[in-house]
Amino acid sequence: MGDPAPSVLLTDAQERSAPAACQSLSRAGYRVGGASSERPAPGQWSRFCDERFDVPDPRGDSREFARAVAEIAEKGRFATVMPGSDAAVIAISAHRDLFPEAVDLGLPTQEVVDACVSKVSLMSRAGDAGLAVPETVVCADRDEALAAAARLGYPVLLKPRRSAFTEDGSIRQRPSLLAADEGALAAGLSGFGRPFLLQRHFSGTLISIGGVSAGGGLPGLAFSRYIRTWPAHAGSVSCSETIPAPADLLERVGKFVAATGWEGIFELELIEGEGGEFAAIDFNPRLYGSLALAVSAGAPLPVIWCDWLLRGRIERGVARPGVRYRWGDADYQHVWARLRDGHPASAAQVLLPRRRTIGPYLRARDPAPALARFLQILQMLRRRLRGS
């Protein structure tokens, strides 16, 4: 008998990225475990997930989360751990001392991880790599924010200083908020931590670059253009399509990732301005939401990374253009919004079926993650009704 297949433990199996990560790894011969602090977790419902584990929420006691993951990895003989959220990356990196030497986390130094989850550091590295950066102000309180917004001009983007930040002893995550006026900005300041960032709104087309940084290069890449986000302004991608990689942009992306020192899976989000310039707005050093698009388009990023980390080989993959991604339960909210605003033709465009379109949950041969997602939505609706 040959050696057993390497094993990979995914955290945050409740996230959109988990089913695609499980599928790609399993088909490449890896044994896959899924850990989650929530139930149901779509990744755990996948037939490509071999083992399922409950862990604490990394946003609570980060050390207890890391301890639980380390114990699972050791007892289950998992060769590596693949974080699925910013909070998990931060917790595992900060408490890497809990993991046995047999578990190869593949993480760069703590200093590099801290810089990669810092939006302030992102701006510095992007500028050095030849990417534009929207003007950004670090604000300590409400008065500084209102003064900065008056100078930048509305609308402005409100962002936390880090993708996940510590407040009141817990790790918090907040998406960006687009504030149209002074009232919206003042109302939205709570929950972003101190200090926070205020950024000039940079209009244009959103571009996602998912990839793998390994062996001094970028063996895995997936370029895509956002078609819609939800919420419609400053939201997560709900519909996108893979595009060819512009050679000049690819060079700058390589310089940027090299400057961060990051190794592993990542997503860099950019805005393409009307003049053709590219401005960096976010960097996610982990599995990211629309990972299913890269996997389905021929760039199995989890496999490329694990092959390098655990098998010492570089397998290259670049996503082919023309493949679409749709996060259905988010994208279809555009239908109701456009009907409400009196635009039925525009609403019909959202419903129009497209060939070569994939989603994060539903697969003909793996339908259970879609059912888990449906149950997740029911849980969210119940919580909202109880809170109303």
Image: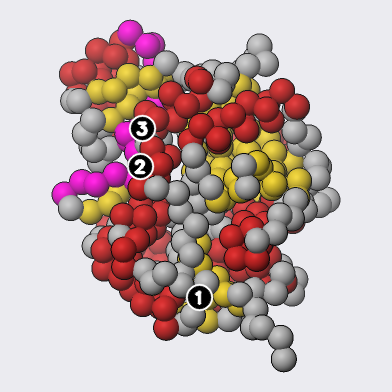
Q: Identify the residue at horizontal 26%, vertical 68% (top origin).
A: 64
Q: Is residue 22 left or right of residue 91?
A: right
Question: Can residue 89 be seen at all in this image of the molecule?
Answer: yes
Q: Which residue is mark 3?
A: 159
Mark 3 vs 1, N-terminal side: 1
Could you tell me the amino acid type at mark 3? Lys
Mark 1 vs 2, N-terminal side: 1
Q: Which mark is residue 297?
A: none
Task: Look at the picture and state if 77 lies above or below 383.
Answer: below
Could you tell me the amino acid type at mark 1? Phe
The picture places residue 92, in percent across and down from the top left corner, at: 36, 59
Disc 1/disc 2 C-alpha distance (Å): 25 Å
The picture places residue 118, in percent across and down from the top left corner, at: 37, 36
Frontmost residue, 201 versus 314: 314
Mark 3 or 1: the one toward you: 1
Give SS at disc 2. helix
Are the residues flagged by discs 3 and 1 in contact, CB closer than 8 Å? no
Q: Which residue is mark 2?
A: 111
Are the residues flagged by discs 3 and 2 in contact, CB closer than 8 Å? no
Part of the protein shown in magenta: 151-168
Q: Identify the residue at horizontal 51%, vertical 67% (top origin).
A: 80
Mark 3 or 2: the one toward you: 2
